[in-house]
Image (cartoon, coloured by chain):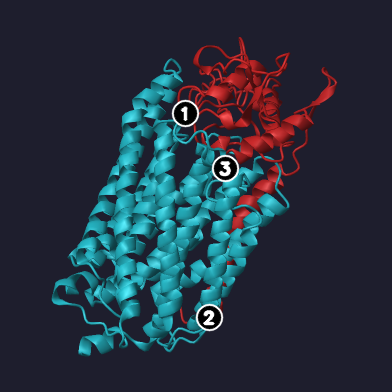
Amino acid sequence: MKNGPLFFLGLFASLTFSFAGVVLFANAQLGGLTPYYDDAEGKSFPERMPGVAERGQLVYRDLGCVSCHTQQVRRPGFGADQARGWGERQSVARDFIHQPYPQVGAMRIGPDLTNLAGRKPSALDAEDLMKLLYAGQGAMPAHAFLFETVKVSGQVPAKALKLTGNLAPASGMAVVPSERAQVLVAYLLSLNTVYDYPESRPFVKAAKKTEGGIK
Amino acid sequence: MSTATTEVSAIDTQARVPVLLLLGFGLVWLLVSGILALIASVQLHTPGFMAGYAWLTYGRSQALQETAFVYGWLGNAGLGLGLWVLARLAGSSLRAGNWIIVGGIFWNVGVALSLAGIMAGDMTGHALFQLPSYAQPLLFLAVGAMSVSGVLAWSDRRSEGTFAAQWYVFAALFFFPWILSVAYVSLLALPLRGVLQSIAAGWYAQNLLTLWLAPLALGAAYYVVPKITGRVLPVYQFAGLGFWTLILVGSWTGGRHLIGGPVPAWVPSLAIASASLLVLHYLLVLLNLRGVFGGGGTSMKLLAFGLIAYVGGGLADAVLSIRSISVITHFTYFAQAQQQLALYGAFSVMIFGALYYAVPRLAGRALTSATLAGGHAILIMAGVVLLVVSLGAAGWSQGQALLDPKISYPEIAAATRPWLLGASAAQALLLLGNLMLGVNFALTLSSSLLASTAPVYAPPAKLAASVS
């Protein structure tokens, strides 16, 4: 490698090649993905996140929730995602097209949240989620810093958490969620993949070939 | 006296201030990241730990320790040693040292700003790319300024040919601004749509390891190993093939972390195939650097350990990325174990090894304490082994349990807890070891500064084996 410019050109070309091959090619394939219009329902999917949920996604991102929770359900037969009740279908690229900051994740220290609000038979509601955030549960740390303990004069605020036992605040006090907690919960409640796209249905193998086919 | 005059050349006196500045900054970040890593590790088995502080909640402490380690420690030390290697191999004194100093200060302001930003919640949410958007231009400019010295050393080299160490370092200098700017544009300035962000972030994270950290560590190793053994590297005619395999193939291996995800299936498949091709690179590096196993001082021990971690980790990546295994290990601590093996076991330990060779020459005197150096090496090697084994075992049991829907999350947490305690113990060992390195470095530097005469390097008999 005596030729400096040629060496430099080689470096440049190899990285350009991999960028084009991985990122640009994927972009060419998926960049133009459009919402899927369902005639029967008369609207397009995925639906846009409500504004409050979009703000909640920012809170989710800045707290680093993604370091423990994924938002991707794998196809049946690859892992036990369906059996754990995380979603009835696999996640597909179309699920994320409206999200400014997709939180796909790569670590499952906690459960997957793809379909948190669409779980069956019963999904967690706002009150459960607030309590979970405030007190933590199992390996999940408490996020008490998202809440304020306020003095109650007269009526207890409607938003106040209904806490019992050790968690209950001192008398005359109430724990109310901050705005950040409220938008975060709104975001969590917007997470669902109830709608089934054509590409998210499990691939059914064609009937076994009998003649000359390899088993 | 002959030792002294041959060992410390004019190159080293020119390089002293800029390179030692980068190494010093690096060691400060190494200790900071060690404390943060210990906090994050404790939080995994004791979730209540520091949970009251928003700026240290696990999501952030994890991002903080990773950023401090990669950009603070590995970046500073790798760049410092790399620029020193380029100057030495050019055979002329290090030029544009002021650019390194200015760039180094900017780089470290950028790292400090990144950490403050992550504490405040400005992280990007992409692994190994948590740098807040406003800190990135600083890092970009800083590495550009430092590269001035590297480019001058490259174009001014006295010999027409080049050495493997030069290829690796020069490539690292060029690739970092390239990938950082691409990631900045495609993830922050004009974000790609949906899951394409995951693909671009995976491309960046892999290249950060493959095209920046690995070349910096290998550049230092390819320079130091023949210096210590006093022999030409074996099978050196294939070093070029090893280099180009890494550059051409390594860059495609990022997508294996997206296996099973909502991305086109070719993304992980291509990456898995590339990871098997990359085996060639690891074998060639092993052949080239096998001289490290001949024994020697602290430097050689660490380089040998780093080489085993690098090659072993690379081969493991190739085998473990296949679908039937990654269905278990994906999304678990096992992936963290593999990453720590690369970041800590391979890159960091190789840099430690090169550092024990370089610092005495740069400071103009032997390291103050051979005991601290030996203790550091032992603690680091023990710490890395314990860390990787603990996380690997935790991940394997977590992965097996996740496949069985009857095993609940609290049960998984209970099963992994002993291993996670082991990982925390490992982080404590690593922190203690690095404290020894920090103290030794500070003592050596201060004795060098306090010396009234120009420093002359002459290793005492006891230290000769460890530093030369």
A142 in relation to B154, above or below: above
Quadrant of the image occupied by residue A183? top right
* Secondary structure under the numbered disc 2 in the rendered image: helix
Chain under disc 1: A
Q: Quadrant of the C terminus of chain B?
A: bottom left
Amino acid at pointer 3: Trp
Amino acid at pointer 2: Asn
* Secondary structure under the numbered disc 1 in the rendered image: loop
Q: Say which colour chain A has.
A: red
Left or right: where B235 falls relative to B343: left
Task: Please give the name of the residue rendered at 27% of the width and 85% of the height, measured from the top-left corner.
Answer: B456
Left or right: where B151 falls relative to B422: right
**According to the image, label 1 marks what residue?**
A214
**According to the image, label 3 marks what residue?**
B266
Kindly indicate whether the residues beneath marks 3 and 1 are on one polypeptide chain.
Answer: no
Q: Which mark is residue B98?
A: 2
